[in-house]
């Protein structure tokens, strides 16, 4: 069997395994899960409508004395239902917001897509959230197209592996938590799944992918151990925000928020671990293929040198990403805390710092470990060359070994 045919069979088996794992995992995880089940009486019907025209805009100002004036805006508009049994029907929807308690609501305009809710039969529809995903979907399609154009089949493989990993998190891990299953076990299971499928999709079925897998395992293992130890030493409870109070009471049996914190940290570390392990493995393999070098020390030094450059940029990217995503929280906490030490010791902040430091630690370990494994796989013992001399009786060995 030639290599091309073997690779096609291997990829076919990997794709089949990847999809079956997500499908079977989803069925198991969803057995007892509470998913998309709002409290009774909240919303009777939900529709996605496209705004056809604005019928009226009314503003009513209410004064509460002093400098406190609140303006409430009521907008009535007609819209066409885009999906479902009532697709194509027209309905009148009311949007209400004010400039104090609902400042996060923008005024509806013609052409917008927006959700309309009908609380009960006979009541008029009220406007909800804007349908924003379509803009991101367009950007996503453009990015995927450029990725495939640049990386070709590897681009397709990258998108597929990323999609399957995200699917494992949202369609397996999240339902497993909402079914009351052990959070630690399912977090490690999802991480193992991502580690097993991602390197072969990107690098193929070879020793390079195996080196990346082993490097990723070392990084995630360190992340798990560090998180467990730090959470115990710092007495982390998992109650870091107001949302956590609601999460813990979703099920009859309280959800273990310490386990959820553990899962969040190791899944966050997983992405950077997979990234650097594949980068280092690929770099060492490229060095070997381009130079033919099989010396262990030389290959290891190359992996370390490349890893040092990757290390600085990866840790910077990791920390800046966490700061960027929590900027509003930082502003709020800085404004209302008395001292910087009190701010840094809030559990909400401590968990974010722990997340950053554990992620950085996994990168620091993954790089040398992957370089070491790659160098060991590619290195060979030097074969001594025997020098020949020619005399009258023909070529004879001198017994002198010449090292390459």
Image (spheres, helix red, strand yellow):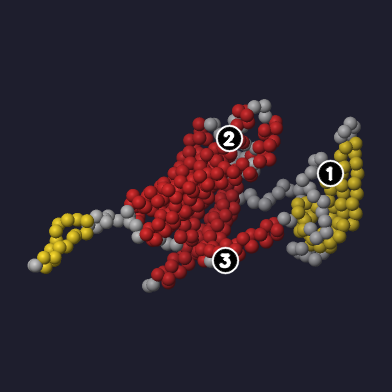
Pointer 3 or 1: first along the chain: 1
Question: What mark, if any, has residue 149 been given in the picture?
Answer: 3
Q: Residues within 10 Å of mark 2 (few under 14, many from 20)?
A: some
Q: What element carries label 2?
A: helix
Q: Which residue lies furthest to the top in this view?
A: 338
The part of the image, by quadrant, that contains residue 103 is: top right
Q: Which of 60 and 288 is in front in this view?
A: 288
* Residue bearing mark 1: 98
Residue sitting at x 54%, y 31%: 235
Which quadrant does the C terminus fall into? bottom left
Q: Is residue 210 visible?
A: no
Residue sitting at x 80%, y 60%: 111
Q: How crowded is mark 3: few (under 14 residues within 10 Å), some or many (20 or more)?
A: few
Q: In this view, does 357 lie above or below 210?
A: above
* Residue bearing mark 2: 350
Q: Give the side of residue 75 with respect to residue 8, left or right.
A: right
Kindly check if marks 2 and 3 are in contact, taking CB atoms under 8 A apart as contact.
no
The part of the image, by quadrant, that contains residue 398 is: bottom left
Question: Disc count in the image?
Answer: 3
């Amino acid at each position: 069997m030639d290599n091309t045919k073997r690779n096609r069979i291997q990829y076919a088996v990997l794709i089949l395994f990847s999809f079956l794992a997500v499908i079977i995992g989803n069925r198991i995880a969803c057995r007892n899960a509470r998913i998309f089940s709002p409290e009774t009486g909240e919303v009777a019907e939900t529709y996605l409508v496209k705004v056809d025209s604005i019928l009226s805009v009314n503003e009513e100002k209410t004064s509460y004395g002093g400098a406190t004036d609140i303006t409430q805006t009521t907008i009535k508009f007609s819209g066409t239902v885009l999906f479902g049994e009532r697709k194509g029907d027209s309905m009148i929807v009311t949007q209400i917001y004010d400039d104090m308690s609902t400042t996060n609501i923008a005024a509806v305009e013609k052409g917008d897509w927006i959700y309309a809710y009908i609380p009960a039969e006979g009541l008029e529809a009220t406007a909800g959230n804007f349908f924003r995903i379509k803009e991101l979907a367009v950007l996503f399609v453009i990015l995927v197209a450029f990725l495939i154009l640049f990386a070709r089949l590897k681009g397709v493989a990258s998108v597929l592996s990323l999609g399957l990993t995200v699917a494992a998190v949202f369609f397996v891990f999240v339902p497993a938590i909402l079914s009351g299953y052990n959070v630690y076990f399912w977090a490690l299971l999802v991480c193992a799944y991502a580690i097993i499928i991602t390197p072969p999709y990107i690098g193929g079925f070879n020793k390079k992918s195996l080196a990346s897998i082993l490097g990723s395992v070392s990084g995630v293992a360190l992340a798990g151990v560090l998180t467990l130890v730090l959470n115990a030493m710092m007495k982390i409870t998992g109650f870091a925000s107001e949302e956590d109070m609601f999460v813990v009471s979703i099920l009859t049996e309280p959800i273990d928020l310490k386990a959820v914190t553990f899962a969040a940290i190791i899944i966050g570390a997983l992405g950077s671990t997979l990234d650097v392990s594949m980068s280092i493995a690929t770099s060492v393999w490229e060095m070997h293929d381009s130079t033919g070098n099989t010396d262990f020390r030389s290959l290891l030094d190359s992996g370390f040198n490349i890893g040092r450059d990757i290390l600085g940029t990866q840790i910077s990217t990791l920390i800046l990403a966490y700061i960027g995503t929590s900027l509003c929280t930082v502003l709020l906490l800085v404004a209302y805390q008395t001292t910087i030490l009190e701010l840094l010791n809030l559990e909400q902040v401590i968990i974010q710092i722990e997340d950053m430091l554990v992620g950085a630690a996994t990168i620091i370990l993954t790089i040398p470990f992957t370089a070491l494994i790659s160098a060991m796989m590619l290195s060979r013992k030097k074969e001594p060359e025997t020098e020949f001399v020619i005399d009258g009786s023909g070529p004879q060995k001198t017994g002198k070994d010449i090292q390459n």
